[in-house]
């Protein structure tokens, strides 16, 4: 992560830039990236850090309060199926589990299809987005994904995810 002289942010390899991540998390990451690109002075940097804390905290609270919209699409992961689901034998990635559920429901699925799924509390812990409801969403998984996405940048900014969301040092060890 770096800021170029023209103000553009150079981001390489960070989870928040990956194409498959949920829109709900990506929008917050893009907002943070945009805010950092406006920084020109140390004072502006400190102000940006405050705003980034708010961006992360707002997303966290929206997850905890289940406020991501009427449908779970905002929380969907999007992964292209590399091969036909029947050829996955040793291990079954999450998008393949979702593809197999779609097949059982009568959908025709083949290699190259984009599989959109959400993380749910019930086994097998994934569900195709078109079959999922908001009440099934595993909020804890999404909080973890929000943390892992932002931790990479927060650390560089001297910020701590758990402190931002309000966990005390004692609560972290419980």
Image (cartoon, rainbow, N blue to C red):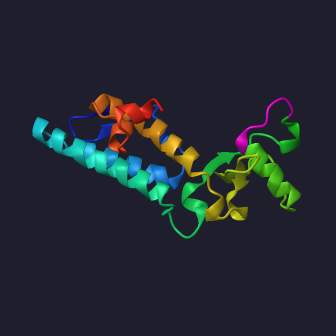
x 12%, y 35%: residue: 42
Viewer-side residue, 47 vs 144 = 144
Does 38 sit above or below residue 74? above
Instruction: Give the left or right position of residue 115, taking residue 103 as reference.
Output: left
Does 95 sit above or below residue 131? above
Q: Indicate the quadrant where residue 81 lies.
A: top right
Q: Measured from the top left, where is residue 20 in percent x and y?
A: 58, 45
Viewer-side residue, 150 vs 96 = 150
Q: Measured from the top left, where is residue 29 in percent x and y?
A: 40, 46
Q: Measured from the top left, where is residue 54 in percent x and y?
A: 30, 51
Q: Measured from the top left, where is residue 79 in percent x and y?
A: 66, 46
Q: How many marks?
A: 0
Q: Is residue 134 shown to the viewer in this render?
A: yes
Instruction: Give the left or right position of residue 68, taking residue 118 as reference.
Output: left
x 72%, y 45%: residue: 95
x 78%, y 45%: residue: 97
Q: Quadrant of the N terminus?
A: top left
Indicate whether residue 147 is drawn in magenta: no
Which residue occupies the extreme bottom position in the image?
70
Q: Is residue 20 shown to the viewer in this render?
A: no
Main secondary structure of the magenta stretch = loop
Viewer-side residue, 140 vs 39 = 140
x 67%, y 50%: residue: 121
Q: Which residues are magenta?
A: 89-94
């Amino acid at each position: 992560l770096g800021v170029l002289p023209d103000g553009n942010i150079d981001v390489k390899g960070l989870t928040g830039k990956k194409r498959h991540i949920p829109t709900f998390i990506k929008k917050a990451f893009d907002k943070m990236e945009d805010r950092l690109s406006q920084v020109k002075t140390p004072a502006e940097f400190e102000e940006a850090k405050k705003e980034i804390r708010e961006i992360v905290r707002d997303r966290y609270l929206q997850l905890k309060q289940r406020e991501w919209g009427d449908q779970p699409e905002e929380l969907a992961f999007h992964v292209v199926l590399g091969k036909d689901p029947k050829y996955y034998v040793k291990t079954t990635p999450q998008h393949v589990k979702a593809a197999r559920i779609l097949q059982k429901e009568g959908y025709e699925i083949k290699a190259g299809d984009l599989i959109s799924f959400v993380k749910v509390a019930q086994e097998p812990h994934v569900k195709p987005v078109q079959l999922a409801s908001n009440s099934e969403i595993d909020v804890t998984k999404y909080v973890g994904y929000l943390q892992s996405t932002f931790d990479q940048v927060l650390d560089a900014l001297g910020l701590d995810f758990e402190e931002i969301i309000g966990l005390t040092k004692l609560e972290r060890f419980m």
